[in-house]
Amino acid sequence: MTPLAELARVMFAAAVSAVQPTTLLRKIEFHGAGVRFQEDELAPAGRLVLVAVGKAAPGLASGFLARSRRAPDLVFVLAPDGVAASGSVAPFLRRASHPLPDSRGVAATAELIAMLAALSSADGVVLLLSGGASALLAAPVEGIGADTCAAVTASLLAAGAGIGELNTVRKRLFAATGGRLAAACPAELLTLAVSDVPGDDLAVIGSGPTVGDATTAAQAREILARHGVQGEFPDVDELLAVLERSATPDTPRPDHPRVARARGHVLGGGGDALAAAAQVARDAGFVPLSLGPRLHGEARVMGHLLGQLAASLAPAEPVALLARGETTVRVHGKGRGGRNLESALAGALALAGLPERCLLAASTDGVDGGSPAAGAVVDGGTIARARALGREPLEALADNDSWSFFADLPEAIVTGPTGTNVADVAFVLAAGRPRAFFAASVEHALSVPPPPPPLGRGGAGERGRRYTGRR
């Protein structure tokens, strides 16, 4: 791999490190009676309860237990399979499947709801929430089977539904989402979340279990119809029709007494990850340019676009473009991969033959779709190296088989579960800076979704000077 690709990997490691639970928990003030975060304090006269749910749950819970000056009276931790947990958390840990819910998540969610409902108004709950919680909080609402919930989730994911769309539907189907967890809890409740969504919206993170829901059953029905899922699940269609006709909101609204009492803050998110990566780039002599939460839409389209942007850079001082968010994949083939691998593969086609350029696309949780990788970092030689091994990129894209393309190549980024989750990041590095019009061009290109491109070789663009590998 080139020095540019090596630098991109260091930037990714810094991004993940910046949003580790141990780092984010430093923002919480612990005192003898409880905790304080910014202007909010939780110091209950009754019991102190710690709940952690999501991909970062074990690390958040472990750090909380180590730093808290007041020992929690009750502890509940729910995390996906594969995420490491310390010995201090093991006695309180439940596991469940992600991204598709399973029976373990159903049982754990029922246990959690019952535990919170049994508290009193004198008690206080700290909920440490992170991405992945939507699938883990899998107990279905009355009248809908757990298998149906899993099947709806799978169909929407395969159809390329975005996280906001997916959560709007799940809030109708899961008994702990859309503010229902707060509505079930008579105790004071403080949510501190690690955000994996654009805009760091607490109503979207983990499907907003403690935040009043502003979405509707009508919106959920429209989402199912838009993605061709309506009609596949008669029980769900019937439920949504009933909810839509009802004069009573189907989820707790923001003015629900218990929901209104609950407080919430974001501990950290993708912005923290990009800031850390930008500093690494800056220290290496690059000019960082943050594109913010602009990763969205079809993964291969976004990857191709970023590859073309990289190809358009002109020689001068080194530049790094950084973006975050979450793309989607519409599954047409039978291969194995993920949204970041697919983005990287499409970007590699646009970069083919170009020196002094690279593109990294990776998930901060270390798991990209159904692959063992977090993503990949590609450069101008990626396509030639793969073709020399008999791997055809266009065939891999057509079959959604990006992992088979990258498996055993140096481009693959394999970290295992990282213990955190702030969605995805993408870096474009070049031994040159943008032309004068480049910043405006990026703003326009990423605000207007482009049509799906013909995914062949990208144009050569202007070649950059030799990167010296400054650190």
Image (cartoon, rainbow, N blue to C red):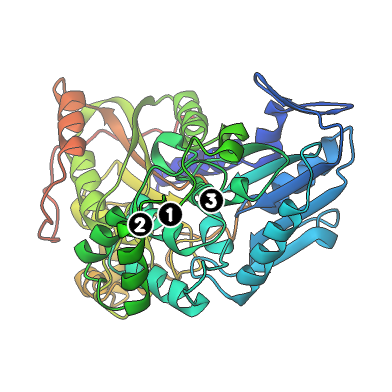
Q: Can see residue 141? A: yes
Residue placed furthest toward the front: 247
Q: Which residue: 77% across, 53% down?
A: 118
- The amino acid beneath tag 1 is Asp
Secondary-structure class at tag 1: loop
Indicate whether 245 appears above or below 449: below
For residue 250, the mark is 1
* Neighbourhood count class around disc 2 (C-alpha, 10 Å): few under 14, some 14–19, many 20 upward: few
Q: Identify the residue under disc 2.
A: 246
Q: CA distance from mark 3 to mark 1?
A: 24 Å
Q: Nearer the viewer, mark 3 or mark 1?
A: 1
- The amino acid beneath tag 2 is Ser
Q: Identify the residue under disc 3.
A: 131
Rendered image quadrant of residue 186: top right
For residue 127, the mark is none
Indicate whether 462 appears above or below 149: above
Q: CA distance from mark 2 to mark 3?
A: 31 Å
